[in-house]
Amino acid sequence: MPTGCSPLPRIVYYASPQPRAKDPYGFWEQKHRRMSQIDIPASWAWSAAEIAQRRWRKVLVIGAVDRGKSTYCGFLSRHLLAAGWRVAIVDADVGQKDIGPPATITLGSPDASLAKVQPTALYFVGAVSPVGHLLPMVIGTRRLVDAAQGEFVLINTTGLVQGVGRILKGYKIEAVQPDVIVAIEQGTELQPITKAYRNYRTLRIQPSASAMVKTPEQRREARERAFGSYFQAATEVVLPCRSLIFQRRDVPTGFEQHLLCGVADRRNKGLGLAIITELNWSRGTLALLTPVLAESIRIIQGGALHLTPDGCELGRR
Ligand SMILES: Nc1ncnc2c1ncn2[C@@H]1O[C@H](COP(=O)(O)OP(=O)(O)O)[C@@H](O)[C@H]1O
Ligand SMILES: [Mg+2]
């Protein structure tokens, strides 16, 4: 039962506590869980019904770490797909990805099958935390939201909501101009953000009691697994430096071994990730480990992370 509580023209809705609903949405694989196993608080069901009924297309999901943002995005996708809408997801959580490899912002289109969502577009951020990388976070999110098709676009975000995270969320809101912000909030932890942007329509919903906290070590291991599985399909490609364009960082100086890079085509379309294995000055070649086809690579975007092919983080810049 929504109640108006904003002094500004747009209404901020608060979900009312109601008995928990049983999952009426069938099955959908979200990471390793089946939707049938997830708990659906009444506020989640209510928010999904509102979003679908009012056709709020751009849905920005915010919340601290492990509050259930990814689970909610899976649940909301399923709800919208079941109603016959096309759904796009922009996964802007560079550290704990649901779609595509870490250090990127990705766009994907889930369907009603249980298949894992593959990215259809990718923007390289170059880091697994937004700290120190706010510009690519905001630009990448905006670019993929612009590229998204479908009646609904769900934008999932990192759990960084304090300090620089609060600033980032603010700029993201300004860049994306969401039709609705879904704030998964425990207590009043998101108030600094929701108050500063209370001119935007916001649905505050509760985290599920089933939400489980991961340790920093578990998060690091999950990233390592995600990088490792991405680079499993990689081969070494050797490219002549003169045919390449180096962006974001200077032309390599020889200290870039293991540096994580984004690779893009000549139109700057992100193709994937690469790890620099060797810069050969005498031959003028750059060797990369990447699953991306060598023929399409024209642009190398330097990242801020050194990585082994099995996903082990060697250091950040
Ligand atoms: N509604 C829910 N029902 C069951 N488990 C949940 C629910 N919400 C979150 N969880 C569990 O809590 C953990 C964190 O949820 P997740 O969606 O990954 O959070 P976030 O994306 O905000 O970091 C996961 O293990 C997830 O399966
Ligand atoms: Mg998540």
Image (tube, helix red, strand yellow):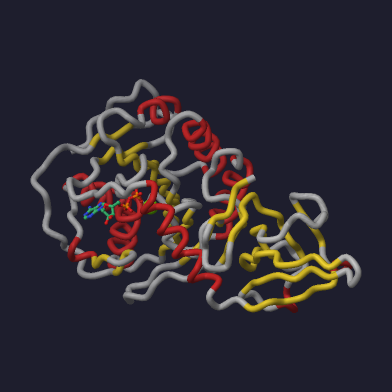
The percent position of residue 56, horizontal first and vertical second, equals 39, 49
Marker count (numbered): 0
Q: Viewed as shown, does residue 311 lie left or right of 31?
A: right
The residue sitting at 51% across, 41% down in the picture is 177
The residue sitting at 41% across, 59% down in the picture is 222
The percent position of residue 148, horizontal first and vertical second, equals 53, 60
The residue sitting at 37% across, 72% down in the picture is 111
Relative vertical location of residue 247 with respect to residue 176 in this rendering, above or below = below
Relative vertical location of residue 36 with respect to residue 302 in this rendering, above or below = below
The percent position of residue 107, horizontal first and vertical second, equals 51, 61
The percent position of residue 195, horizontal first and vertical second, equals 39, 25
Q: Viewed as shown, does residue 229 lie left or right of 80?
A: right
Q: Viewed as shown, does residue 142 lie left or right of 294?
A: left
Residue toward you, 157 or 129 = 129
Report the quarter where the C terminus lies. Answer: top right
Residue toward you, 70 or 311 = 311
Q: Which of the 4 image quarters holds residue 96?
A: bottom left
Relative vertical location of residue 317 with respect to residue 105 in this rendering, above or below = above
Residue occupying the far right of the picture: 282
The residue sitting at 41% across, 58% down in the picture is 221
Report the quarter where the N terminus lies. Answer: top left
Q: Which of the 4 image quarters holds residue 188?
A: top left
Residue occupying the far left of the picture: 19
